[in-house]
């Protein structure tokens, strides 16, 4: 991918190396961090070099009568610069965003203030099936005149539009998109909400789920536990390889989406519960009772496998102790440093059997990795 803003836009920090060189550099970094626990080669899953991001946020820069998309400036010597640069292209977004974002800007600029006044950011959430939800964020209260104008954008750009301002959310049609992904020979439908977590790179996401399925197939029995399940991204496809599934997540919105997704995909062996990982540990250790779990018989589960996919901070001590009691662990991580830290403890009871790197975030330092551990 080339972009005229490389070197000035803070969004893509890795641009001097070509894509293959970036992958090699990332692989070296992850391999070095995992070396104390795993010395075989990592399995590598690359990304399309351009048009890979299905969600993206742009600031809006106002200059005289006009507004433009903008991004934070590239840090200098590691120090973030104040201000923003205006953006004229962004080849990392998937086509369903790219084909709409510039027409949207024209329409905002042509809207005689209705869409433009105090607009400070635009968020895009799109699917590989060409759905696109556009959220316009304002520092002003939105009224019926705004809604009428925004409805025209929905029709003209064949998309969904939402407006947000302080304590106000205006939904014109829906606040979600519906993604369909072909995973390991089956098609899964996922409702993705604007305010919930979604994996940003659909191509790499499918590779990541298929890698997790390959590990699950090696187990092929027992019950499955998942923490940090989000909208059921891994849960739905992996549920086919286990008897019963218990999946937990802190966000109410994501649990709502997960339940919807379970029904949409006609899956009946999953129970979703809204629990922080720390609460899940308390519940499964019988330390605390939760009214949210009153209809769930936790003693009925016999977990052969657990999957964790925590945020960058990695796992808390209680979760590490809990999962250390389960034979098979699939750990998906968006931060190889905290993964390596957590492996210090997990490898006292388990051995790393497989490790992989998935390039969800090309042209940035970020990298996603995964390990499969089995009890020694
Ligand atoms: C990296 S995302 C992974 C989500 C999901 N596995 C997926 O692939 O879409 C991490 C998820 O952890 C959730 N989360 C954050 N802190 C949590 C906590 N303390 N306990 C449980 N879930 C948490 C977030 O809401 C988010 O959905």
Image (cartoon, rainbow, N blue to C red):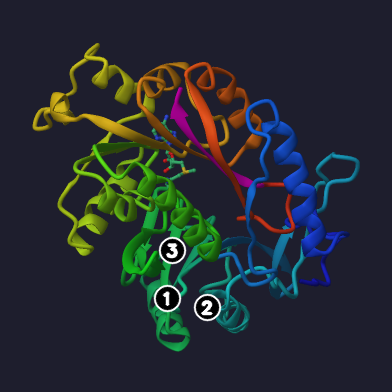
Vertical side of 344 occupied by 309: above or below? below
Rendered-image quarter of ligand 1: top left
- Magenta stretch in the rendered image: 367-376
Q: Please give the residue where the numbered disc 1 appears in the rendered image.
A: 131
- Residue at far top of view: 287
Vertical side of 110 occupied by 74: above or below? above
Q: Is residue 61 left or right of residue 21?
A: left
Main SS type for the magenta part? strand
Disc assigned to residue 96: 2
**CB-based contact (under 8 Å), mark 1 and mark 2:** yes
Residue 203 position within the rendered picture, expressed as x and y whole percent measured from the top left: 53, 66
Closest to the observer, 123 or 207? 207
Residue 11 position within the rendered picture, expressed as x and y whole percent measured from the top left: 73, 56
Q: Is residue 64 left or right of residue 296?
A: right
**Quick one: label 1 or label 2, which is nearer the N terminus?**
2
Q: Is residue 299 left or right of residue 108?
A: left
Examine the structure image and report whether residue 370 is included in the region drawn in magenta.
yes
Q: Marks 3 and 2, how far apart in space? A: 20 Å
Disc assigned to residue 163: 3
Q: Marks 1 and 3, how far apart in space? A: 17 Å
Where disc 1 sits, the SS reads loop
**Quick one: label 1 or label 3, which is nearer the N terminus?**
1
- Residue at far bottom of view: 156
Q: Nearer the viewer, mark 1 or mark 3?
A: 1
Closest to the observer, 51 or 253? 51
């Amino acid at each position: 991918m080339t972009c005229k803003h490389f070197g000035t836009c803070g969004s893509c920090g890795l641009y001097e190396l070509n894509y293959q060189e970036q992958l090699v550099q990332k692989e070296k970094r992850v391999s070095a961090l995992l070396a104390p626990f795993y010395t075989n080669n990592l399995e590598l899953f690359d990304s399309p070099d351009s048009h890979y991001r299905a969600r993206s946020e742009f600031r809006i820069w106002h200059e005289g009568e006009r507004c433009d998309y903008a991004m934070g400036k590239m840090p200098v010597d590691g120090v973030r610069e104040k201000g923003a640069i205006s953006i004229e292209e962004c080849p990392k977004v998937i086509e369903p965003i790219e084909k709409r974002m510039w027409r949207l800007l024209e329409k905002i600029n042509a809207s005689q203030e209705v869409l433009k006044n105090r607009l400070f950011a635009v968020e895009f959430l799109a699917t590989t099936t060409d759905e696109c939800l556009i959220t316009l964020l304002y520092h002003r209260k939105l009224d019926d005149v705004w809604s009428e104008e925004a409805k025209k954008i929905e029709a003209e750009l064949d998309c969904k539009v939402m407006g947000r301002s302080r304590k106000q959310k205006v939904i014109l049609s829906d606040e979600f998109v519906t993604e369909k992904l072909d995973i390991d020979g089956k098609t899964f439908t996922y409702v993705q909400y604007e305010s919930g977590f979604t994996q940003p790179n659909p191509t790499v996401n499918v590779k990541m789920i298929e890698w997790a399925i390959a590990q699950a197939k090696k187990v092929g029995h027992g019950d499955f536990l998942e923490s940090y399940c989000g909208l059921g991204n891994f849960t739905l496809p992996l549920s086919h390889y286990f008897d019963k599934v218990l999946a937990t997540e802190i966000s109410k919105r994501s649990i709502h989406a997960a339940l919807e997704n379970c029904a949409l995909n006609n899956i009946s062996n999953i129970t979703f519960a809204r629990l922080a990982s720390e609460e899940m540990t308390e519940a499964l250790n019988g330390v605390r009772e939760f009214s949210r779990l009153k209809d769930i018989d936790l003693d009925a589960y016999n977990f052969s496998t657990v999957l964790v996919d925590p945020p960058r901070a990695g796992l808390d001590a209680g979760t590490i102790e809990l999962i250390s009691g389960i034979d098979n662990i699939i750990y998906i991580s968006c931060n190889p440093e905290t993964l390596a830290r957590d492996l210090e403890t997990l490898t006292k009871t388990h051995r790393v059997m497989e490790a992989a790197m998935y390039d969800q975030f090309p042209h940035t330092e970020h990298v996603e990795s995964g390990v499969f551990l089995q009890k020694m």
